[in-house]
Amino acid sequence: AQSVTQLDSQVPVFEEAPVELRCNYSSSVSVYLFWYVQYPNQGLQLLLKYLSGSTLVKGINGFEAEFNKSQTSFHLRKPSVHISDTAEYFCAVSEVGGTNAGKSTFGDGTTLTVKP
Amino acid sequence: EPEVTQTPSHQVTQMGQEVILRCVPISNHLYFYWYRQILGQKVEFLVSFYNNEISEKSEIFDDQFSVERPDGSNFTLKIRSTKLEDSAMYFCASSDYRDQPQHFGDGTRLSIL
């Protein structure tokens, strides 16, 4: 079975500072990886996805993530955050093939709080 | 870009009542999903649906839940007799193939009183 671990439940950071939100996954088959952002009282918005190819993927709002197969990680980064980036961030994995294909498994989420 | 749309955005229902949450998946997609997020918790898989039948369901998806594709565009989640613990945000998602990334709707917030 697949699983996702987001290593930090809360990340406070000052405006214009860099940030990294960590995500590790476990799966016995190849995976797709996703980061979603959820603003208060809103739905899930896809930030970026890794399907195949280049391990560095760029998403919306200046975010990027790097897929590291050997470390089974998919950490999310932004070089300079804004107040408006304050939100909940979810890492998710979907298996390619296998019995769990088509089902996304989410991490517990990381609350990013950007302070002025 | 095509979107998954969900209605209503917020549903308030008395405990014990039936509720139907509606979703319009992306038009050429074939696989449909429901997820649930209890306030402050992670997003959890409920059920996947393909070719007019359930392909997989989680332990959460018990006999009080059902899904249906009543016509060519809608995909619904019915909760027969709602309980307080059904209060959550419910997300619909769709994909064109089983292995392909899912597109999520904005969710329906269900509040059971």
Image: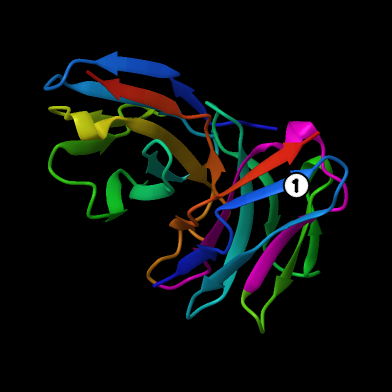
**Pointer 1: what residue?**
A13
Considering only vertical position in the picture, is A11 above or below B80?
below
Q: Nearer the viewer, residue A93 or A84?
A: A84
Considering only vertical position in the picture, is B37 above or below A98?
above
Give percent across and percent down for residue B107.
47, 29
Q: Nearer the viewer, residue B7 or A116?
A: A116
Considering only vertical position in the picture, is A63 above or below B86?
below
Horizontally, is B32 left or right of B95 in the view?
left
Give the chain letter at badge 1: A
Range shown magenta: A73-98
Within 10 Å of disc 1 (Cα), the crowding (few <14, some 14-19, many 20+) is some
Horizontally, is A74 left or right of A3 in the view?
right
Residue B3 within the segment the image draws in magenta: no
Residue A97 within the segment the image draws in magenta: yes
Residue at 67%, 79% in the rendered image: A69
Q: In the image, what residue type sits under mark 1?
A: Val
